Amino acid sequence: MRISKGALLVVVALLVPFVVEFRTALSWFGIKLTVLESLALAGVLVLGLLLWAVWPKNGNGGTGTADSS
């Protein structure tokens, strides 16, 4: 994993107020988001974060070839 489980939990917990405040900020510009749309946005953000967190750092999904024997 790219990030520890504790840090991942903290980032996911911080996404909740971010999505709520983002919804408020968008309303200043006349863009209205429903609660369901906000939940969908939060779900997409959490899913993207989880995918990034479990994706291998080297990008090829395998182990390094330098030390494998």
Image (spheres, rainbow, N blue to C red):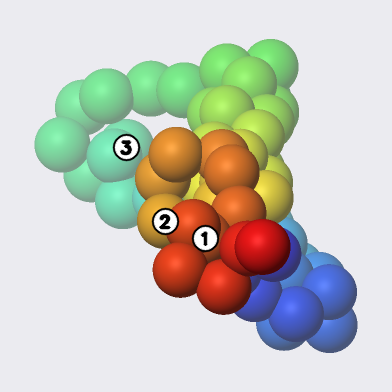
Q: Position of residue 37 (x, y in %)?
A: 57, 18
**SS assignment at label 1:** loop
Disc 2 marks which residue? 58
**SS assignment at label 3:** helix
Q: Position of residue 51 (x, y in %)?
A: 61, 39
Foreground: disc 2 or disc 3? 2
Q: Are marks 2 and 1 in contact (CB under 8 Å)?
A: yes
User: Residue 43 is drawn in which quadrant?
Assistant: top right
Q: CA distance from mark 2 to mark 3?
A: 40 Å
Q: CA distance from mark 2 to mark 1?
A: 8 Å
Q: CA distance from mark 1 to mark 3?
A: 48 Å
Foreground: disc 2 or disc 1? 1
Q: Amino acid at mark 1?
A: Gly
Report the front residue among 44 and 4.
4
Q: Amino acid at mark 2?
A: Asn
Q: Are marks 1 and 3 in contact (CB under 8 Å)?
A: no
| Label 1 crowd bin: few (<14), some (14–19), many (20+), radius 10 Å | few
Which residue is farthest left?
A: 29
How many circles with numbers are drawn on the protein? 3
User: Residue 15 is drawn in which quadrant?
Assistant: bottom right
Q: Which residue appears at 31% of the width and 51% of the height?
A: 25
Disc 3 marks which residue? 27
| Label 3 crowd bin: few (<14), some (14–19), many (20+), radius 10 Å | few
